Amino acid sequence: MPFNRILFRSSAARLAALALAGCFLLTACQQKDPSPAAATRESATAESAIPTEETSVSETPVQTLATQDGTVLTQTDDAGRSYVDETLFIGDSNTARYMMYADETGRAFTSLDNNIGVVSMGAGSITTLKCEQFVGYSSMYTIPDAVAMLKPKRIIIGFGTNNLSGTSTDASSFIKSYLTGLKAIQEAWPYADIIVNAIPPLDKQRENQNLNMVQVDAYNAALVKMCEENGLKFLNSTEVLKDSSTGWAKTDYTLSDGVHLSKTAVTAFFEYVRTHAYITEDRRPQPLGDIPKPNGTPVGLICQDPIAVRGAKVPVEFVASTGGSLQGSTSQLVKKGGSCSTVTAVPQKGWKFDHWSASLGSAGSSASLTFTVPTNADAGGVVLTAHFTPDEHEHDYVELTDKHINATCLNGGSATYACSICGEIIEKDLPALGHSWDSGKVTQEPQPGVAGQRTYTCTRCGATRTEEIAALAVSTPTPAPAPTPDQPASPPPAATSEPTPTPHLHSYTQGEYVAPTCEEPGYQTYVCSCGDSYQQEIAPTDHSWDEGKVTTEPGYGTPGVRTYACLNCGLTRTEEIPPLEPTPSPDSGTTPPAEGGTPTEGSGSTPTDGQSISPAAVPSEAPPEG
């Protein structure tokens, strides 16, 4: 939706978003900063502290602060893996790590197709940094341009960690640059829902002690306010990543640098994404057309480390896939070119070690691994995954009922199964059910010459549709023929009654669907088992014109032309640009020329071809003769 559109919201929803912002600020105020300057600040503000009864912070404040119609996304049913797959994730190195970790099925949480994660990138570079590559394209593209090429249904964007610089709570500059980037994305592709993700919490034992949760909480509070004022949604992922008792990240939720999220944290994050879903009608123009294949962001694109956690060392994390565990230090901070301490992959019963994989560099085939950190590693670090395969057996899959997502009339669901022998997880999509219409109810009786109406209701979701009942015939009385004198009129034959047939009740299902274009409507066909069908028309989408381009420059007395092109179908239209009008010079006394002429001086000079003669030079009457 356009950023300049003011949306109606209930006062309760608006107060909810503001209350969450207050919770972030409150948490920031309660953080303990060991520096002497912080102690001075705490002492100076103690007398003006908020009253005690208002300072308690609920462990799960979002659930009671806003409804799903508000700014902050609240808990929903699990939207399933499909919700993640149709979402484009944009952000910094923590976003890039979504591609390094896999879920319980062995699939990475995101892929190059739905992830633009740039190590060390801050919000101010959204519109300027060319960071994304596409297969078959020689150029690189900024995030707004890449979004327009990928055409996503929704976006979850998370920047801010690389904009941190200490304990300042003034977020005005950060919000200004972030909002500029968000507007550029929205203008490049206005058909996607934009969800702003919270800045993740830091670990108390972070490597860079200048980074502080005071600033993180203040920036998150400012993000809530920004989203509220601009019609955006806010994903409060700190709710699942932050320890409410300490105000810092939960134990083992970050790597050894205290900034980058661990696999445990990323797993919890995506569970939160799926259960705080925001699903709206797909507004994208159909068909989408060709979408280029992303090739990702080059390693080392940004050589500077804005938050100074990289230095000569990078975080290295060891993780185990399904079927085994690890022995050794699984989170290490190692110099580039240096070697990690040995970590050993240990298979569970019924499994065997298969291989190691590395997000950067190469790993050995032995279960015990001493990894050497590549010299081109960056702040995003390296993730090494131990893979295991089950011993040969026939899988015995059992459905995990707590992960079942029911299909609805319009949306598909999913079912998750686990092998009872090896624990392997698979997920199957369930198709949408389609509407199940009842026998219908006459909501408008037909009249002679006037059609009636029958309304059908879906027995599953309550949706309704209507069907016209044919109008009754308008009867015209026919006079009986007059009897002849020779033959008396015969009495009319007695009417014979015929049995009334039992009417057939239609039960329609969805048939052919034709999407609308800019000028032509589309339609959805519904078909009954008896062969009867009807169509519901879908209105045209209308043209979406660009800003136009001057194709003919205007001249003096000659209009120009500006040509506009539709962003959806490519159709063009033109608009006239008024001709230029010369401005007379007060000093020279020059009269503006007529079309195609030249200026004339007011001194009475002799006119030439194309010049007009001054009225004073022509006598009003001829002199009398003789």
Image: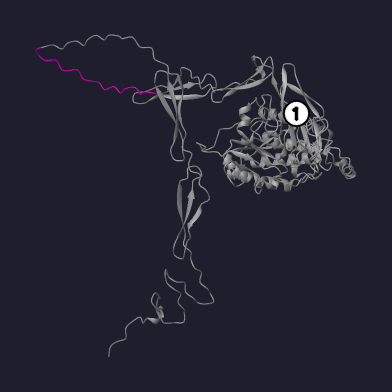
Q: Residue furthest bottom?
A: 626
Q: Position of residue 48 (x, y in %)?
A: 85, 41
Q: Is residue 479 magenta?
A: yes
User: Is residue 5 in sight in this rendering?
Assistant: no
| Residue in the image at 81% along x and 42% along y | 211
In this rendering, the count of numbered labels is 1
Q: Position of residue 611 (x, y in %)?
A: 40, 76
Q: Is residue 562 magenta?
A: no
Q: Quadrant of the C terminus?
A: bottom left
Q: Residue furthest left?
A: 486
- Span colored in magenta: 468-486
Q: Nearer the viewer, residue 505 or 449?
A: 505
| Residue in the image at 36% along x and 23% along y | 470
Q: Position of residue 169 (x, y in %)?
A: 79, 44
Structural crowding at the residue carrying mark 1, measured as other residues with C-alpha within 10 Å and reported as few (<14), some (14–19) or many (≥20): many
Q: Quadrant of residue 423?
A: top right
| Residue in the image at 26% along x and 10% along y | 495
Which residue has dot 1 on it?
319
Which element type, helix, strand or loop, lies under badge 1? Answer: strand
**Drawn side of residue 464 relative to residue 253, left or right:** left
User: Is residue 235 in sight in this rendering?
Assistant: yes
Q: Position of residue 541 (x, y in %)?
A: 48, 39
